Amino acid sequence: MTEILSAPLVVEFPFTRSLGPVQSAFLTGLRERTVLGVRTEDGRVLVPPVEYDPVTANELRSLLRVAPTGTVTTWAWNPAPRRDQPLGTPFAWVLVRLDGADTALLHALDAPGPDAVHTGMRVRIRWAATRTGAITDIACFEPYDGEPGTTEPAPHEEAFTDPVTGITVPARLDYVHTPGRAQSAYLKALEDHRTVGERCPACRKVYVPPRGACPTCGIATAEQVDVGPRGTVTTFCIVNIKAKNLDIDVPYVYAHIALDGADLALHGRIAGIPYDQVRMGLRVEPVWAEGARHPDHYRPTGEPDAGYDTYKELV
């Protein structure tokens, strides 16, 4: 019986976006220790602000300054902070309706324990010592026993100098992946430089990588079938933007490849041929780097191109 594999995986990339005038003002305001909201057409003040009215979809530009104090509307205790969360010690996630706002802002509350947190408690912003124009300029909220701030937001019409026009946010997902019986067998076969799929007992199609069930018929698969190693390029794209931490010069070609005997194309990089000579129907074979557990790339075999009718169902 195939050993079921399991491994920690990380998906991480920097998400970069430009800011419109409202979001730019909001984040620049945080840098200047100013919290801005926006007034909707029905008179509500939204914090954080949005650029379009959620009811009418009309553009919003009426910026207002609200107080750095507010009221907790709901909360949840976080006993074990994770990497890059606002605080390194246990804290509460809170929704805070700042004085002058009609909506709540999500952030962290620094409190000694869950017994010290309750809906309706008064809090205030603790500003970060170094501010760059990001939501992290609010280090957290903290309990506040002072006098309530004004509930009437003040118009904000002044322009900030050196406004924030874009942000880059690192997105990261840490998880443990268990591929299951079918894909574990597929990965183990790759260690022996073999590619295996599974055949559907009903439609008789062979799927690579196998999923343990036929995606067409919806029934379980178990019959293993060796496919390839050669195959046919069905579609491809030319990559012109170099990815970080990927030591491959651009441009290069990434393609869908229908291995001989398979009824589903998998993807792989094409090398050993100028990028502008890669074409549909090109016959290719895998190239394995020493000690690798999967093909490094595919290269032309020198065979005549496959006819379109032989792979048109896999395009």
Image (cartoon, grey):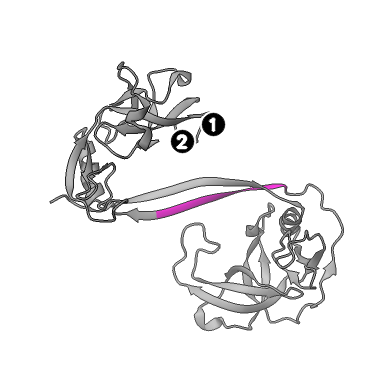
Q: Which mark is residue 241?
A: 1
Regarding residue 51, the answer to whether it shows in the image is yes
Q: Quadrant of the C terminus?
A: top left
Dot 1 crowding, Cα within 10 Å, few <14, some 14–19, many 20+: few
Image x and y of residue 304, in percent: 32, 17
> Based on the displayed image, in which of its 4 quarters is residue 74 positioned?
bottom right
Q: Give me the residue at 44% from left, 30% from top.
A: 236
Image x and y of residue 206, in percent: 25, 42
In the image, which residues are magenta? 165-174
Most distant residue in the left direction: 1
Image x and y of residue 284, in percent: 32, 24
Q: Is residue 124 left or right of residue 179?
A: right
Q: Give me the residue at 80% from left, 69% from top.
A: 41
Residue type beneath disc 2: Asn
Nearer the observer: mark 1 or 2; the answer is 1
Q: Is residue 206 above or below residue 80?
A: above
The one of 288 and 228 positioned closer to us in this rendering: 228
> Based on the displayed image, in which of its 4 quarters is residue 176 positioned?
bottom left
Q: Is residue 160 left or right of residue 175?
A: right
Q: Is residue 115 above or below residue 126?
A: below
Q: Is residue 284 above or below residue 214?
A: above
Q: Secondary structure at mark 1?
A: loop
Q: Which mark is residue 245?
A: 2
Q: Give me the residue at 45% from left, 33% from top.
A: 246
Q: Is residue 22 above or below residue 304?
A: below
Q: Is residue 288 left or right of residue 1?
A: right
Q: Which mark is residue 231?
A: none
Find the distance from the CA under tag 1 to the CA under tag 2.
Answer: 12 Å
Q: How many marks?
A: 2
Regarding residue 247, the answer to whether it shows in the image is no
Q: Secondary structure at mark 2?
A: loop
Residue 188 belongs to the span the image colors magenta: no
